[in-house]
Each structure stands twice: as C-alpha cells, then as structure tokens.
Amino acid sequence: MIKSKDLLGIKDLSAEEIIRILDTAAVFKDVLARDIKKVPTLRGKTVVNVFFEPSTRTRTSFELAAKRLSTDVVNFSVPASSIAKGETLKDTALTIQALGADFVVIRHSSAGVPYFLSRVLKASVINAGDGSNEHPTQALLDLFTIRSSKENIEGLTVAIIGDVAHSRVAKSNIYGLTKLGAKVRLIGPPTLMPVAINNLPVDIYNSMEEGIRGADVIMTLRIQLERQNRGFFPSLEEYFKLYGLTGDRLKLAKEDAMVMHPGPINRGIEISTDAADGPQSVILEQVTNGLAVRMAVLYLLSGVKE
Ligand code: CP
C-alpha cells in the first residue's frame, strides 16, 4: 500500500511502495488487453486534471486511466478559468475540491506546487510534473517498461543522457532506479548536470562514447529549452554531434540495450531517427505502459485514508 494520500515524488517512496505500484500496474495491463477495458473500480470518484504546462502523453493517459476506472474526469482549462481574473492557485484548488474532486492531477512550471496543494487539499494530489523537480508517474512507467523487458532492475546499468539539470524525468528516474538497485550513469556536458550532483548516487560521464559503453538501458532526454535562461552549449548542431544518440553510438551499448525517451522527442537534436524508430526503441511502449501505471496510482491512492 502507498502510505501517503498523494503521489508527489519518487524521492518520498520506499522501494516496496514502488514495487507495489509496478505489480498493480501489471494487473491493470492485463485488464487493458481484454475486449472490455473498463472496470467499475473507482465509480463515483472524480479526477480533475489541472495542467499549467502543455502535455500530450501525461494528460491524455491520466484522462484515459481515470475513464478506464469508471471515474468522472474534468480537464480543467487554465486559460479559460478564473485564474485569468486573478484567482490564486490555492483558491482555485479549494474551489475544485468543493465541487467534489477526489484527485487533483497537477502539472506546473514551478517546483513544489504539488507539495503546496497537498497541504491545502483533502483530495489526493498527483504530481504530473513540477518544474525541474520531479515527474513521478513518468519514472514509474519507465521502471515498468524496463521491468517488462529485463528480468531484474537490480544490477542493470542505465545511462541517462542530456539535459539532466532541467529534467524532472531524470530526477525521478535517478531516485527510482537507484532505490531498485540499478547503477545510473549521467552523460552530458558539465553545464547540463545538476548543481547538487555530488549528493546523487550516480556516475558522471562527459564523453558519450564512454558513458553508453556496455549499458543495458539508454535513456535520452529532451533539451528543455523552455527552462534554459542562457546558452548551456554552443548550438543544437554541436549538441547532436557530441551527445546525440545515433545508431552507430548505440552499438557501443549492450546488444539488447533498450532505447528510451520520455517524449516529446526532438529528432536530430537528442536522438536520430534510426535510433528512435529502430528495433531497440521502446519509446511508444513507454507511452502505452503509462496508462496501466496511472490506473495503478489512482487505484492505490484511493485506498489511503487520512
Ligand atoms: N513525458 C511527458 O511528460 O510527456 P508530455 O509532456 O506529452 O505529457
């Protein structure tokens, strides 16, 4: 069982809680393979998606996950809401709760917003990405996808490439992978590594070739230009030349290495088309698994009483 009413970050979860979510997601993956994919498990509950930043995968899969569990779903439109008239986030969230929300799924450009809402609301708050801090359901679906292909996460070498400093996906994956016993390598220019890097249980590589050699899993990250307020590297062309994942570079990893990317992908910047669409790529499988994982999160949080 998950101990908290909220899912705010992987940092807050124990290895047992992560495994419990992954095991539950496996059950829902079986449900999703049936002809009738809908179950009445959370009938009568209400999920409200509140996204202050764009999203394709996370928002759509939370909506579908909620519908597959028979909840009512509202996609709150931030630009069309009373936030445009000056209403605060706290008052907006309390209003959504007063209308009967049981779950608030929040994405925000500022780190810490889901933590703030979790203290204000009785409803379960699920972090769908807060600034450069965490994106817990993305890491859970990544762990689920790795576990589907590799027998054990413990002992695997996972190379995470690129803009780690601005990536909430990287942070959540570093916490999740290391809690489950994987060895994590971070590859990228020093300017794109987190400031508190020495506090993380990871190995750092500035050379792409050295970093991906012998890896079991290669995870490329999108360059988060929207979070960069200065030039962290000379040009996108230069970045691709030094850190782009190509079919040739992929040959340095293990023969059965998985190629992952949280999406959206920028072809020709962090990954080439042959690597993104090649036989080792599980990028679309990650998206598919997001549905079962988000069903598991909604289901498990619904059982937590304060
Ligand atoms: N991986 C991810 O968060 O994608 P979206 O921004 O499309 O939700």
Image (spheres, rainbow, N blue to C red):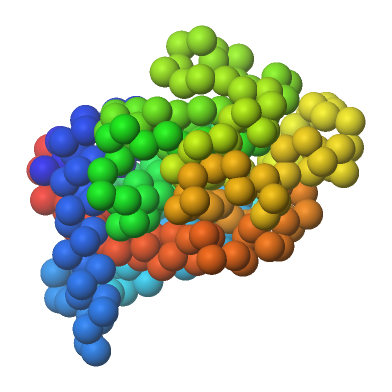
Identify the residue at the far top of this view.
Answer: 198
Q: Could you tell me residue 66's position as x and y percent?
A: 31, 67
Picture residue at 17% right of the left edge, 56% below the top: 24
**Number of marks:** 0
Report whether 269 appears left or right of 87: right
Report whether 123 appears left or right of 106: left
Examine the rendering and report whether any part of residue 164 can be seen.
no
Report whether 88 appears left or right of 151: right
Q: Could you tell me residue 210's position as x and y percent?
A: 62, 28
The one of 240 and 24 positioned closer to us in this rendering? 240
Picture residue at 58% right of the left edge, 55% below the top: 263
The one of 304 and 288 positioned closer to us in this rendering? 288
290 to 38, vertically: above or below:
above
Q: Could you tell me residue 214's position as x and y percent?
A: 50, 37
Q: Residue 16's quadrant in the figure? A: top left
The one of 123 and 55 positioned closer to us in this rendering? 55
Q: Quadrant of the N terminus?
A: top left
Q: Quadrant of the C terminus?
A: top left
Q: Residue 119's quadrant in the figure? A: top left
